[in-house]
Image: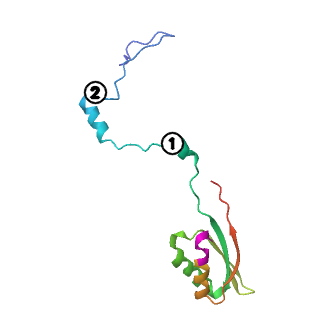
Amino acid sequence: MFNSSVPPEKGSVRATRMPSLVSQGSSSRASRSTATPRPILSLRNARQPAPQRATVQLVVRVPTREAQLARCTLHSLLGSALGVHTIDIDRRRDLACLHVELDRRRVAEAMALLMRTLSGAEFGTVRRLERAA
């Protein structure tokens, strides 16, 4: 180990002995056999981007008094899969416009449920949302 009582000479290099991190003997073999193997990642897998779900924005217009029902209906159908959603309220025309982000595969199901639940629901454009990775 380093001896602090003798200062090293200027410009000299002192070699120190470091303890080994790998224990020797049968104990090292035992620790290796019980260790959890690490997954091997190939370069081909590392280059392929993870598949992303196609997210869309669905626009739904309902009377203002039915906005809460529309939101609750979507929550009951989609649960945590319901993405960001906003509600714009137009008091003069008594309309609420819901902008809902959801998986593209669930759009037909969401629209069918809203049409059954809310007779006055109108649907606007369904736009694909581009997400930066």
| For discs 2 and 1, the disc positioned in front in the rendered view | 1
The image quarter in which residue 39 lies:
top left
Q: Amino acid at mark 2?
A: Gln
Q: Is the residue marked by circle 1 packed among few (<14), some (14-19), or many (20+) residues within 10 Å?
A: few
Q: Earlier in the sequence, mark 2 or mark 1?
A: 2
Q: Where does the magenta region start and end?
A: 101-108
Is 27 magenta? The answer is no
**Spot occupied by residue 59 in the image (x, y as percentages of width and height):** 68, 76
Q: Is residue 25 visible?
A: yes
Q: Taken as a whole, is the magenta stretch helix, strand or loop?
A: helix
- Left/right placement of residue 63 relative to residue 6 reads right
Residue holding disc 1 = 42
Residue holding disc 2 = 24
Q: Is 119 placed above or below 102 here?
A: below
Q: Is residue 68 visible?
A: no
- Left/right placement of residue 117 relative to residue 123 reads left
